[in-house]
Image (cartoon, grey):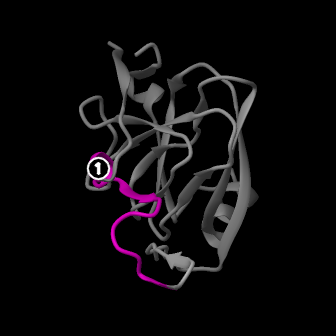
């Protein structure tokens, strides 16, 4: 029997997102700087060369089928203007995403840095328009494994097809 889960979008704050990662926003006292220049340092880490990309998420139904987590990198997403987009996450401590541990957040103007091992939807879902663009920071080895050898089982990433586990996840954007 298929379990249907309807996720409401939660407010994206440092507190609500803390189990999954950090916000990429100036928060708290600055870490460095000088007159007219403030710096907040965020703890990005990767085990191979960093890879900076621009990712375009195309409009699609608000149905989450595949979740993944990266074991060797803290991954980031920073909106580049345009429409907001929804990302679904689950805690890194979970063996697998379930209806009880999935959360949905709206990404607009503020980026995120996922903790290493945090489950996340492979897509972000634009709320309007044809697409949403994001600056995306990951690592070469993880990206190469996923895109250069897509038919080989990944070692740096765990992937779960929720549909194959009879879990149907829909994001409720009406609220």
Residue 10 drawn above or below residue 159: above
* 84 left or right, relative to 40: right
Q: Position of residue 118 (x, y in %)?
A: 39, 54
* Quadrant of the rendering where the N terminus is positioned: top left
* 95 left or right, relative to 46: left
Whether residue 46 is visible to the viewer of this picture, yes or no, is no
* Quadrant of the rendering where the C terminus is positioned: top left
Q: Nearer the viewer, residue 139 or 172?
A: 172
Q: What count of labels does the image hold?
A: 1
Residue 135: name its quadrant: bottom right
Q: Nearer the viewer, residue 31 or 66?
A: 31
Residue 157 drawn above or below residue 175: below
Q: Position of residue 128 (x, y in %)?
A: 65, 23
Residue on which disc 1 sits: 95
Assess whether residue 7 is covered by the magenta stretch: no
Q: Which residues are magenta?
A: 15-33
Identify the residue shown where x is 33% and y is 67%: 28
Assess whether residue 25 is covered by the magenta stretch: yes
Identify the residue shown where x is 43% and y is 75%: 43
Residue 142: name its quadrant: bottom right
Whether residue 94 is visible to the viewer of this picture, yes or no, is yes
Residue 27 drawn above or below residue 66: below
Identify the residue shown where x is 58% and y is 38%: 124
Q: Position of residue 90 (x, y in %)?
A: 34, 44
* 150 left or right, relative to 174: right
Q: Nearer the viewer, residue 159 or 31?
A: 31
């Amino acid at each position: 029997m298929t379990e249907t889960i309807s996720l409401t979008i939660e407010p994206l704050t440092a507190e609500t997102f803390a189990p999954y990662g950090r916000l990429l926003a100036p928060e708290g006292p600055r870490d460095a700087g000088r007159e007219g220049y403030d710096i907040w340092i965020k703890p990005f880490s990767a085990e191979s060369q960093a890879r900076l990309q621009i990712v375009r998420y195309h409009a699609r139904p608000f149905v989450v089928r595949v979740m993944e987590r990266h074991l060797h990198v803290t991954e980031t997403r920073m909106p580049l203007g345009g429409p907001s987009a929804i990302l679904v996450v689950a805690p890194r401590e979970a063996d697998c995403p379930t209806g009880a541990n999935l959360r949905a957040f709206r990404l607009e103007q503020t980026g995120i840095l996922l903790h290493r091992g945090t489950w996340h939807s492979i897509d972000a879902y634009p709320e309007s328009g044809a697409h949403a663009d994001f600056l995306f920071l990951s690592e070469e080895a993880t990206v190469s494994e996923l895109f250069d050898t897509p038919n080989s089982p990944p070692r740096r990433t765990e992937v779960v097809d929720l549909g194959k586990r009879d879990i149907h996840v829909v994001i409720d954007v009406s609220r």
